[in-house]
Image (cartoon, rainbow, N blue to C red):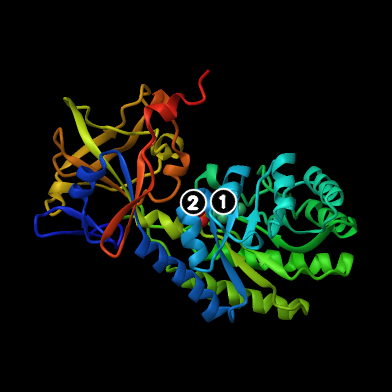
Amino acid sequence: MFISKNLAVNEKGHLTIGGIDTLDLAKKYGTPLYVMDEDLIRENCEKFKKSIDDYYEKNGLVCYASKAFSCKEIYRIMKDEGLGVDVVSLGEMYTAVSAGFASEKIYLHGNNKTIEELKFAVEHKIGRIVVDNLNELELLNCIAKDMRSKVDVLIRVKPGIDAHTHDFIRTGQIDSKFGFAIETGEALSAAKLAVELDNINLVGAHCHIGSQILDVDPFVLAADVMIKFISDVKDATGIEMCELNLGGGFGIKYVDKDDPVDYEEYMKAVSIMIQKKCDQYNLNRPFIVIEPGRSLIAPTGITLYTVGARKEIPNIRTYVSVDGGMTDNPRYALYKSEYDAIVASKASEEKNEIVTIAGKCCESGDLIGENMLLQHAETGDILAVCATGAYNYSMASNYNRNLKPAVVMIKDGKSRVIVNRETLEDLVKNDI
Ligand SMILES: *Cc1c(COP(=O)(O)O)cnc(C)c1O
């Protein structure tokens, strides 16, 4: 009945998440509020780990792509689950390290890493640096030399795959700011250079073909291309890279029409391809890394808002405005991403209105969604927007000097704050 499996209705007809009444949560912590479900996060971690155990003989690592949602507590949970994490900035790296995350299980990504980021990574012995371009490769070699260390790197490759997704989140093709293209020979030259540099240890290759991908085929094709690349590098340099990182991008159900594949299907299909290609090229099966972000946490979260103004424009549309908007969820404004929403106190009632849910920012494009089917929402109602666990809090801003909401985590039927609501003092603390 609901988009995410942790949502239900209680005897009062109220929406619950992880068994807790969302109206109670809104009352206790205020709105807007992000709510996440730790039980479901852990269940998802287990599923991904099990897929590697079952189909790839435990020879791999699940890394949580922490740009989806980064705060200290999520790194603690991922550590406890035995996952690695990937980070894309000094801020994420710092948050992970300060939460006590083991640096050897951190992967650093980014298409334009700063000197400061690379120095921090070398100094803190971050497990893998995923090198994106030649400037970075040479810079990293110098930094490592200065610090008398040798760093393990993967090279980021563009496998040239069209992953049938939104242009903005398609990254595997040649015209992308991320990585080295295979077709042009760029990726092979980078690998050759990496092998020559004294303070670089080339251990593997990485690709990430896009996001919210709902088929298995692009991943299988990527595995095919990547094993061939490992073979080409071996032929050219004599070095057989032992690690293959296939990135993330596994899709989830945001709205009814989305039909994601079961997570284990990816590893099953990808493992078969890897084995086949390794046999063909006479290679050892590489250690495999996958980097789910959205799929691990998006379905575990919701955002609770309080409905304010209702504006019915005859024959045009009805706006239902909420006390948040693009500042806590910019994804509709950025990519017209669709969401499902529920009036929390009327969760068991049929949805009988088509509305536009608007935020409170001074931008006409500040919408959570258009043409959304919803129960009749009145001023004062609590509105839940579903599957907001990924790329919401992490993309939040202070536009219009709105305060970032708190994040509440649910576990075993109990709630706790894991990120405090911003205060007005927080807002002005850097102002001179
Ligand atoms: C964003 C990203 C991911 C995670 O993508 P999801 O779609 O959230 O699974 C994984 N790896 C890299 C390198 C990324 O940039």
As helix, strand or loop, the secondary structure at mark 2 comes to helix
Residue at the image position 65 percent from the left and 44 percent from the top:
176
Residue bearing the label numbered 1: 98
Please determine whether, in this image, residue 376 is positioned above or below residue 240: above
Quarter of the rendering containing residue 337: top left
- Residue 427 falls in image quadrant: top left
Q: Please identify the residue farthest to the top as the structure is shown.
A: 432
Q: Is mark 2 within 8 Å of ligand 1?
A: no
Is residue 402 among what the camera can see?
A: no
Q: Residue 260 versus residue 325: which sits nearer the camera? A: 325
Q: Compared to 143, does 201 lie above or below?
A: below
Image coords of residue 71 (percent x, y)? 48, 49
- Residue at 31 percent across and 42 percent down: it is 33
Q: Position of residue 149 (x, y in %)?
A: 82, 56
Relative image position of residue 217 (x, y in whole percent): 54, 65
Task: Give yes or no for contact between labels 2 and 1 (Cβ–Cβ under 8 Å).
Answer: yes
* Residue under pointer 2: 72
Please name the amino acid that badge 2 sits on.
Answer: Lys
Q: Is residue 261 above or below residue 107?
A: below
311 left or right of 399 in image: left
Q: Residue at x 53, y 69 (%)?
A: 82
Q: CA distance from mark 2 to mark 1?
A: 7 Å
Which of the pair 95/323 is nearer the observer? 95
